[in-house]
Amino acid sequence: MRLSRRGQQSPGGVPEGPDAAGRVYATVVGYFQRAGWHYDEVGDRITVVSSFKGRERTWSCIAQAVESQKLALFYSVIVDAVPLERRAEATVLVTRANYGMLDGAFELDLDGGELRFRTSVSFGSLDDDAFTGGGLAESLFGGSVISNVLTADRYFEAIVDVAEGRSDGTSAVALAEGGPAGDAAG
């Protein structure tokens, strides 16, 4: 995961503002504290790193606060580096899994091979009261986190199978989504 710094681009190309330790960041940290998640703060207080234990595996999770856009991003990093020879098949998996997905998206870095799932929450229209003591902003972020880790857990084994060459993207998505292997419905 490429971490952003003040004045640089965040992973989604969103410029970071000079106030990196504002309400969105406090919302992210507040959620992790109230939910009892262990986390580490990274860099200049815009990034929080944690992990999640799914049904069969544990993976890294990264939260970023983009204060200038009143946006919180949450990532589940599923595979650090899909081998170059498996990236075309991983692209098929990502495209099929994303089609019709309502909340979040899988992302594949074609250069480095990182495969992750991203959810986000925009707090743009919330008033100041929504950011106080576990209020609406924290609840919205928490919902995004839960949706993220449940989706990552659902697809985790399929993604690893494709990355390690045990399955093709189409069959892996079909199995993750409960269909028969080889079913192209996605």
Image: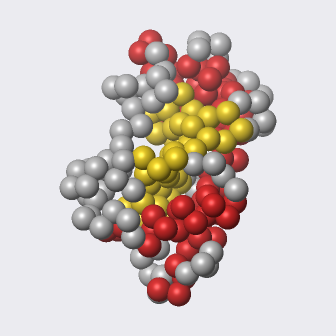
**Quarter of image, res 162:** top right
The x, y position of residue 84, in whole percent, is 41, 15
Q: Is residue 180 above or below residue 137?
A: above
Front residue of 148/179: it is 148
- Split into 4 quadrants, where in the image is the C terminus? top right
Q: Is residue 8 left or right of residue 166?
A: left
Front residue of 178/117: it is 117
Q: Residue furthest left?
A: 7
Q: Is residue 99 above or below residue 83?
A: below
Please say which color scheme the image uses.
Answer: secondary structure
Residue at 45% x, 30% y is: 114
Front residue of 80/24: it is 24
Q: Is residue 70 above or below residue 43?
A: below
For residue 45, say whether it is visible. Answer: yes
Residue at 52% x, 47% y is: 40
Front residue of 4/96: it is 4
For residue 177, say whether it is visible. Answer: no
- Split into 4 quadrants, where in the image is the N terminus? top left
Q: Is residue 37 left or right of residue 179?
A: left
Q: Is residue 13 left or right of residue 156?
A: left
Residue at 67% x, 33% y is: 58
The x, y position of residue 52, in whole percent, is 66, 42
The x, y position of residue 109, in whole percent, is 39, 32
